[in-house]
Image: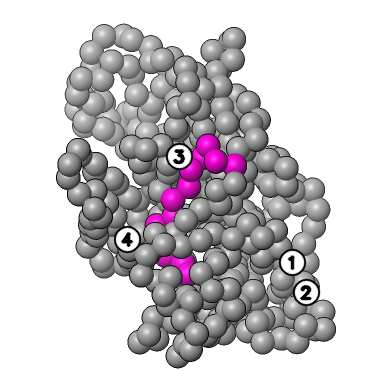
Amino acid sequence: MPFNQGPLKGGMSFKPIKVPVPLEIDDQLAPAQIAAYSSYKVVDDIVLPEGFTYDPIAAWGDKIGDDGRCGYNNDYLSFVETGPDRGYLTINFEYISGFTWMQTYGQAIGRSLPFQEVIAATRGDINAFALSEDNPLKAKIREICQECLIDQGIEVISLGRNSDGKWARTFSEADRRITGFSGWQDGRYLRATGPAVAVFEKRYKRGYEDGLGDRIIGTFANCAGGTTPWGTVLRAEENFQAQVPEPVFADSSSTDPGLNRFYIENRFIAGQGNIFGLAGNKYSWIVEVDPANPNDYGTKHTWLGRFRHEAVGVRAEARKQLAVYSGCDQRGDTSTNSSAKN
């Protein structure tokens, strides 16, 4: 809880932290600002106002469920209460930061990956999907890309407030990871609803066929989201174009995975879906997950449109159509989407 020192300018009841630039709530004239902001100390920590505290809940690499681990670069959080001081926390893991991810992977996960070997062999980008299965380079690229995709997606963990008043994990059977790789080896495919299912199941496609019908391998590029009135969580797939091809043919089938090649250098990794032959038209949707259902690995609602979704909000009123709103985060695009369903 905040330390209450009486109302401040702007109606705040606590003293905010010092940031690198003056704010209106400082209520300082220019000479005082110069004196106060002539220097600024950066610390490697979460800095909170006086009276606030934080407690780590889960960190990259921590075990989640039977066979998962906590992911990387979380974006959206949703807490769905199940009772007093109890509930499910769901977390989005949007992307990996190439340089720091490669630099610290061994420390966090406890094993190494052949980064430098692959960088030296590829010298930039390569259509790894087209490599023969007996090519040793393909196996090394697959290992790296698999780990990249595992560290993206969605996480569900159960939480409770303990006797000290702190929140901590309670390790329920619903704890699980839904990764960018789910379904590839474990059979935990995501499913889809809406008009695109007909495209996925179409027998004769103009473009690429992944052979999976309406089954989908994983979810990634998970940006912000929203919590529904019925206790599920919606997740927005945003900048997927860094990992699989974005364009589709006139019949909405996917372009070839080779259109988005695998790329790696010392500071950057992209095209992680290339080597697995992921169909690009199965990404950039809104994904719904029921955190309380341990067998739910996500449903992509294609009637909500395919674009670079940023967040999603639901408006539900009795005896009215359900409305869902989402923004498009493509550069230069400020459009929003709204859909209604009886």
Which disc number belongs to residue 304? Answer: 4
Q: Residue at x 43, y 70 (%)?
A: 197
Which disc number belongs to residue 222? Answer: none
Spatial distance from mark 2 to mark 3, Cα to Cα?
Answer: 35 Å
Callout 1 crowding tier (Cα within 10 Å): few <14, some 14–19, many ≥20: some
Q: Position of residue 305 (x, y in %)?
A: 32, 65
Callout 2 crowding tier (Cα within 10 Å): few <14, some 14–19, many ≥20: some
Residue that carries the numbered disc 2 in the rendered image: 139
Report the amino acid beneath label 4: Leu
Q: Residue at x 32, y 17 (%)?
A: 14
Nearer the observer: mark 1 or 4; the answer is 4
Q: Is residue 9 magenta?
A: no
Report the amino acid beneath label 1: Glu
Spatial distance from mark 2 to mark 1, Cα to Cα?
Answer: 6 Å
Residue that carries the numbered disc 3 in the rendered image: 77
Q: Position of residue 167 (x, y in %)?
A: 55, 22
* Residue toward you, 246 or 234: 234
Spatial distance from mark 3 to mark 4, Cα to Cα?
Answer: 21 Å
Report the amino acid beneath label 2: Ala
